[in-house]
Image (tube, rainbow, N blue to C red):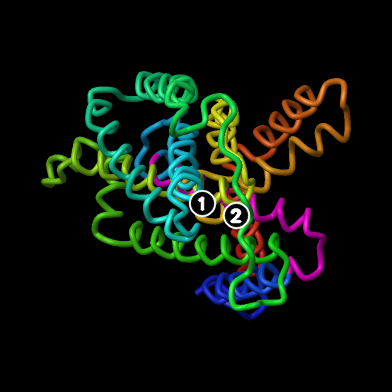
């Protein structure tokens, strides 16, 4: 077995996981509440990108419409909290179930489409959803949206609201990443990947491709819906214009830049989605999107397989050097 500095790859991975969790746990204690808020958004977007990764990275279905499921999850949480005064933590499973059903139902007619045609159908979903939300103003607040209140830490914990929401989001993310890991490494996960790599061979082996594709679409939407519910709780506000088609494009960009078919790629993608636009604006307030585009070009040219793939290649190169 190849070793690097006396440790196997699996031991290095376990060590990196422990160190990453330690850093994630200590982070709110050493940064301001505003930075805690930003890193909470990173966690939330990482959950959404994990959902998109299940669909695009592992199953091969392209979606430019996951901002719609993010909006559905956010509005589910906002309506339950504002109209029915339900505790915020109960809104997460509700948002997940609503988006699971929505994604599964959308995935059924989308089975007739593949590649760019499927991408165009999901793009239409992303364009239409914000406009539809404006017409149900008795529930959604119309163009004015819904204003929420940040929950206080429970049990008298000595944490600020932003710190508590960071830890709450982190706990949800760990559970959902663990569930995704078990799904991908199960028999169902192997079937999902087989449909991406060898669709004809998968159907020949008895895999029900339409069912698995629709199921993957539903599970992917569930992850994005839970992320949307968390986003509504953290940001304290939802409005149709907050979920424009650019959000869906940002999710796809984050998934690709972070690394498709990669769990760590979802985290790297979340960092990109949150911080690169801010950095671009700090560099040039006159043309921030030009700087953003330049960053994106650099990432794509230097890391064509994403940040996660780039780091894997570095690790493999070090392992080969060590073995030789």
Residue 249 falls left or right of residue 35: left
Residue 315 falls left or right of residue 276: left
Q: Is residue 66 above or below residue 28?
A: above
Residue 209 falls left or right of residue 89: left
Determine crowd level at label 1: few under 14, some 14-19, many 20+ residues with C-alpha closer than 10 A.
Answer: many
Determine crowd level at label 2: few under 14, some 14-19, many 20+ residues with C-alpha closer than 10 A.
Answer: many
| Residue at x-position 77% and y-position 55% | 35
Q: Is residue 34 above or below residue 118?
A: below
Residue 253 occupies quadrant: top right
Give the magenta part as a residue range.
27-55
The location of residue 19, given as percent across then percent down, is 66, 73
Residue contact at pointers 2 and 1, CB within 8 angstroms: yes
Residue 279 occupies quadrant: top right
Q: CA distance from mark 2 to mark 1?
A: 6 Å
Residue 43 numbered tag: 2
Asked whether residue 30 is drawn in magenta, I would say: yes
Q: Is residue 135 visible?
A: yes
Residue 269 numbered tag: none
By secondary structure, the bulk of the magenta-drawn segment is best described as helix
| Residue at x-position 59% and y-position 70% | 17
The location of residue 268, given as percent across then percent down, is 63, 50
253, 75: nearer the viewer: 75
| Residue at x-position 29% and y-position 47% | 192
Residue 47 numbered tag: 1
144, 324: nearer the viewer: 144
Q: Is residue 245 visible?
A: no
Quarter of the C terminus within the rendering: bottom right
Q: Is residue 277 above or below residue 86?
A: above
């Amino acid at each position: 077995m190849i070793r690097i500095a006396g440790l196997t790859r699996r031991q290095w991975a376990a060590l990196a996981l422990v160190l990453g969790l330690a850093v994630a746990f200590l982070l709110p204690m050493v940064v301001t509440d505003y930075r805690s808020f930003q890193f909470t958004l990173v966690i939330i977007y990482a959950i959404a990108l994990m959902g998109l990764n299940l669909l695009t990275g592992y199953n091969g279905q392209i979606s430019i419409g996951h901002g719609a499921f993010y909006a559905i999850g956010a509005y589910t949480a906002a309506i339950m909290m504002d109209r029915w005064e339900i505790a915020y933590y109960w809104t997460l499973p509700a948002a997940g179930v609503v988006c699971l059903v929505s994604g599964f139902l959308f995935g059924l007619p989308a089975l007739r489409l593949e590649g760019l045609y499927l991408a165009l159908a999901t793009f239409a979903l992303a364009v239409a959803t914000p406009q539809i939300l404006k017409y149900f103003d008795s529930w959604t607040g119309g163009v004015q949206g819904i204003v929420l209140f940040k929950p206080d830490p429970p049990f008298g914990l000595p944490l600020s609201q932003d710190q508590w929401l960071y830890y709450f989001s982190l706990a949800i993310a760990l559970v959902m990443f663990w569930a995704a890991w078990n799904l991908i490494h199960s028999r169902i996960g192997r079937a999902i990947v087989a449909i991406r790599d060898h669709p004809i061979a998968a159907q020949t082996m008895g895999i029900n491709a339409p069912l698995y594709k629709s199921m993957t679409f539903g599970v992917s939407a569930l992850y994005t819906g839970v992320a949307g519910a968390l986003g509504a709780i953290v940001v304290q506000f939802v409005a149709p214009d907050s979920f424009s088609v650019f959000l869906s494009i940002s999710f796809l960009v984050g998934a690709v830049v972070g690394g498709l078919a990669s769990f760590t790629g979802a985290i790297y993608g979340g960092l990109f989605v949150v911080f690169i636009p801010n950095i671009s604006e700090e560099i040039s307030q006159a043309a921030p999107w030009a700087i953003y585009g330049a960053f994106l070009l650099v990432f794509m040219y230097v890391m064509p397989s994403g940040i996660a793939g780039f780091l894997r290649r570095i690790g493999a190169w070090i392992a080969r050097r060590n073995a030789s």
